[in-house]
Image (spheres, grey):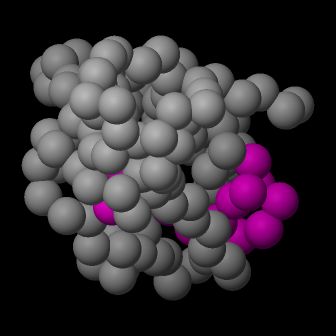
Amino acid sequence: MFKISDKTLNESELKQQTLDKSAGGFVCFEGWVRDHNQDKQVQKLAYEAYPKLAIKEGNQIIQEALEKFKVKKIRCTHRVGLLEIGDMAVWVGVSAAHRDAAFKACRYVLDEVKSRVPIWKNETWSDGESGWVEQEYENHH
């Protein structure tokens, strides 16, 4: 249900894995590499993960969301390796009988993955410097 990938994410394939015939709706979120962060111009970035723990924790988060929101299927894939501006870094998809549960479950998975899964981001900026960036955690409950 939760995957780490060093390959370009294929949103059509991920959506097909998430659809369910008993679901009335599907919600997804795609997170892309942007060209700036905290007033710095970003040229590229690299994600690193502790795969065994990341997959275990990611699947735990998905299991929590399935139970909490009573949705049908959830998939989440996060990229690792070198990414360029505009590349997709994370994909979360949820199929559910009702839209409200699908939206809430998608948000929950994304927020918890960014908060709990051991994935680190190293940005390279336009001034030639680079550094590890703390994942932003936005909580709007």
Q: Residue furthest front?
A: 127
Residue 32 on image: x %, y %: 45, 56
Q: Nearer the viewer, residue 126 or 134?
A: 126
The residue under the point 57% across, 65% down is: 28
Residue 96 appears in view: yes
Residue 130 horizontal side relative to residue 63, left or right: left
Q: Is residue 3 magenta?
A: no
Residue 139 on image: x %, y %: 77, 27
Q: Quick check: 33 above or below 40?
A: below
Residue 111 on image: x %, y %: 61, 32
Residue 94 appears in view: no
The residue under the point 27% across, 55% down is: 84
Residue 110 location, quadrant: top right
Q: Quick check: 130 above or below 70?
A: above
In magenta, the rendered stretch is 87-104
The residue under the point 52% across, 33% down is: 40
Residue 43 on image: x %, y %: 32, 46
Residue 78 horizontal side relative to residue 51, left or right: right
Quadrant of the snapshot with the C terminus: top right
Residue 120 location, quadrant: top left
Q: Nearer the viewer, residue 38 or 137?
A: 38
